Amino acid sequence: MSENQISQQEWQPSINPWIMVIPVMLAVFIYVLDGTIGNVALPHMAGSFSATRDESMWILTSYLIAAGIVIPAVDFFSKLFGRKNFFIISILMFTISSMLCGLAKNIEFMIFARILQGFGGGGILPISQAVMLESFPKEKRALAMAVFGMGIIIAPILGPVMGGWITDNWTWPWIFYINIPLGCIAAILSKKLIEDPPYAKRQKNVKIDALGFFYLTVWLISLQVVLDKGNNADWFNATWIRWTFGVSLVACVLFFRSQIRNKNSLIDLSIFKDRNFSAGTFIQVVIQAVLYASLAILPQFLQNMMGYTAFLSGAAMMPRGFGSMISMVLVGTISNKVDNRLLVILGLSLIGASSLAFGALNLQIANMNIVIPNFIMGMGMGLSMIPIMNLSVDTLRNDQMTNATGIQNLLKNIGSAIGTSLVATMLTRYAQVHQYMMVGVMNDLNPAFIERMQSTAGALMQYTQTAVAQYMAQYSLYRQLIQQSTLWAFIDSFRIFGLLCFGVIPLLFFMKKIKKTA
């Protein structure tokens, strides 16, 4: 039987696929965890390296850039080395570079180590997803994806909590050192337990699309620079941002043009002809953007507006993890019995509703006002992400999985970066808008303002001179205005992301439902 015939059928590994899950999920967990575990430790790292906050941000972004560059080339490297071998190489590179990150003594070496870590980690997620999809028969894929989803949803939530605890109780290098034993175990178990299907083994005469790889690198690096520095540089009002974005746009167009015209392209874009894949990928990008935006915005709200510590703000995200775990177990149980599109609709509705609930917060809230919406959002993430993964690849052949998961993870990586950058811009700009709208009422023609000024100044006069008391009263009221305008910026941002989740629901009606299997 030819490899193509095998790919059309359901290839099955010789060992129990649930045993293969162990090294796969261990590798996924440490890779995804590293995307957020360093966030709370960033000020400590910046202090150790005598770096500014802007300079220290490259510790995070260099990792994303490097991973994004490797992800589309996963299919090529899998053919060059064999997918199992490339997976093990990726784990070992990730592990070794984690050790180098912990040993870094200056910002330059740290960025170099993070780039290596991103190169290693970039191959882990798409290969893991492809292995999970191919190793299980279709009737068990939903349960397999539920397990896979636990790693990609829960790990980013645990990251800030673990990072805060390790940084406070040990030192920041240990957030990288903990990867070393886990990475070694994952590599050893992968060597023993993972099998390659015939079409994923090492192939001869494999050529790389060097020009496409160059365009991809220029596109992602320039895009990441724009997303990271755009808000501080006032976006397109800065000449260098316009030029950098122009370079990114041209490189993006040239990259996709080269992928269409080149026979030995990095990615096969013909897969977008499948409407399930196209619509499902777009919905996943939106979910990923909302997930990472909320992971960025909610801790800021809790720390800056409510006075939470870094560890407590991370701990406040834990109910989301519990909600995700419950919903994933539910999805694995019922997904073969109901239309998966209905599960995604329910999940997106829960994410949207919880975001709108966050958009109704104020500064006199109780802990339950954070816990309940977080739990509901976690439920929504689990109910939407796993079924949409299944829907998006259900109509594809097995030999298309590595290419498909590579493209999806590239676009989701970009979605995460855009969501994080967009929410930072929204907070800044909406705070300015609301401050401008509210400052107009702070004048001598407003009786309410005059009354508040007089009462505040009167209370302060017993401690200082009249002129000083008047100045202090004005300053106190202005601080309240800044606080309220910032609060409204958070509220607007939560509401917009909530509405965005409802906005993508109609795309599900363009997707074919998964055929039920016995």
Image (cartoon, rainbow, N blue to C red):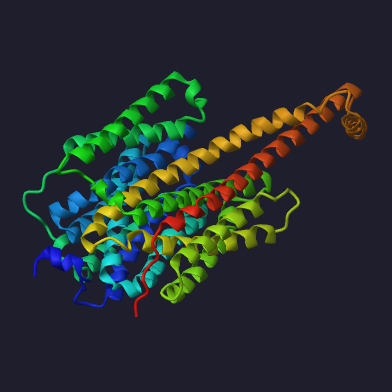
**In the rendering, at what x and y percent does residue 384 appear?**
48, 61
Q: Is residue 146 above or below residue 493?
A: below
What residue is rendered at 63% in x and 35% in y?
Answer: 430
Q: Is residue 161 above or below residue 73?
A: below
Task: Determine whether, in the image, residue 461 is placed left or right of residue 503.
Answer: right
**In the rendering, at what x and y percent does residue 160 appear?**
50, 53
What residue is rendered at 60% in x and 32% in y?
Answer: 429
Camera-nearest residue between 495 and 365: 495
**In the rendering, at what x and y percent does residue 50 appear?**
45, 33
Question: Which quadrant is home to the N terminus?
Answer: bottom left
Task: Determine whether, in the image, residue 16 is placed left or right of residue 198.
Answer: right
Camera-nearest residue between 321 and 266: 266
What residue is rendered at 19% in x and 43% in y?
Answer: 265
Residue at the limit of the structure toward the bottom, as seen here? 518
Task: Determine whether, in the image, residue 33 is placed left or right of residue 472.
Answer: left
Residue at the limit of the structure toward the top, as seen here? 239
Q: Quadrant of residue 29?
A: bottom left
Residue 37 can be seen, yes or no:
no
Q: Is residue 210 above or below residue 443?
A: below
